[in-house]
Image (spheres, rainbow, N blue to C red):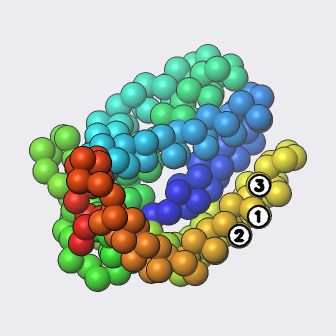
Amino acid sequence: MMAMTHALAGLLLATFVVQLGGGDPATVVAAAVAGSVFPDLDIYAGHRKTLHFPVFGWFPAGLAVVLALAIPTTATLALATFLVAAALHPVMDLYGGGLELRPWEGRSEKAVYSHYHGRWLAPRRLVPYDGSPRDLALAGVLGVPALTLPEPVPPLVVVTIVVGGVYVALRKRLATVWSQVARALPPELRHHVPERFYE
C-alpha cells in the first residue's frame, strides 16, 4: 500500500490512543506517523524484508502496550503507538500487491518477508497494488476518525488524501519513469537500484 495509506492508518491508531489513553496528542500523533512509515526506510535495501516484521514486530509492540497500560505516560503511549504502527505496516502490505515495479500485472508472489517463517509471504491482493483506486478508498476511510484530532491534524489528513489521489492518478506512468531513470544511470550506480526497477 502507498505511504499515505500507512500514515493514515497510523493516525487512526493515534486517534484511539489519544481518546482512550490520553497523553500529549502531538507526541502520540508524531509517534504514530513515524511508526507507520518507518518500515519503508528499507525501500532501497531489501524492501519489505529488512525492516518489515509481520510476526516478530508484534512482540515488542505487545510489550510496549503492556507497559503503556501499566504506566500510561506520554512517553510510554508514544512508544507503544510507534511500535504497533510499525508492526501493522507489514501486515497491511501482506494484504496488498506483490513486490514488483508494476504490481497490477500480478506476477510477483512476494508480498512481505517473514523472518519467523523464513520465507516470503504471498500477497493477498485485497488492495490490488499500491496506488490503486482501492488503496485511495482505504486511505480515505482510515483518515476520517483522525479528523477529530486537534489542529493541525485535520488539514494534514486532507492534504495526505489529496497527495494520495495525485499518486493514484500518476501511478502507472511513474513505473515507466522509474524504469527509464534506472536504465539511464551510469553502470557503477545501477547496483544501488533494486532489480525490480529494470523490469
If you read the primary sequence from the N terminus, does the residue marked by circle 3 or circle 2 appear first? 3
Q: Is residue 142 left or right of residue 186?
A: right
- The image quarter containing residue 141 is bottom right
Q: Residue at the location (34% across, 70% down)?
A: 179
Q: Residue at the location (54% across, 35% down)?
A: 82
Provide residue 188's location: percent of width, then percent of height. Answer: 24, 47
Q: Residues within 10 Å of mark 3 (few under 14, many from 20)?
A: some
Residue 143 image label: none
Q: Residues within 10 Å of mark 2 (few under 14, many from 20)?
A: some
Q: Residue at the location (81% across, 56% down)?
A: 154
- Read off the residue under disc 2: 162
Q: Residue at the location (69% across, 23% down)?
A: 74
Q: Amino acid at mark 3?
A: Leu
Q: Is residue 73 left or right of residue 98?
A: right
- Read off the residue under disc 1: 158
**Can I make out residue 114 in this image?**
yes
Foreground mark, 1 or 2, reads: 2
> Residue at the top extreme?
71
Q: Amino acid at mark 2?
A: Val
Work out whether 140 lies above or below 65: below
Provide residue 61's location: percent of width, then percent of height. Answer: 44, 32
Residue 156 image label: 3
Q: Residues within 10 Å of mark 1 (few under 14, many from 20)?
A: some
Of residues 119 and 41, the one drawn nearer to the viewer in this rendering? 41
Q: Amino acid at mark 1?
A: Val
- The image quarter containing residue 127 is bottom left
| Badge 1 vs badge 2, beta-carbon distance below 8 Å | yes
Image quadrant occupied by the N terminus = bottom left
| Badge 1 vs badge 3, beta-carbon distance below 8 Å | yes
Distance CA(mark 1)–CA(mark 2): 6 Å
Q: Is residue 192 left or right of residue 87?
A: left
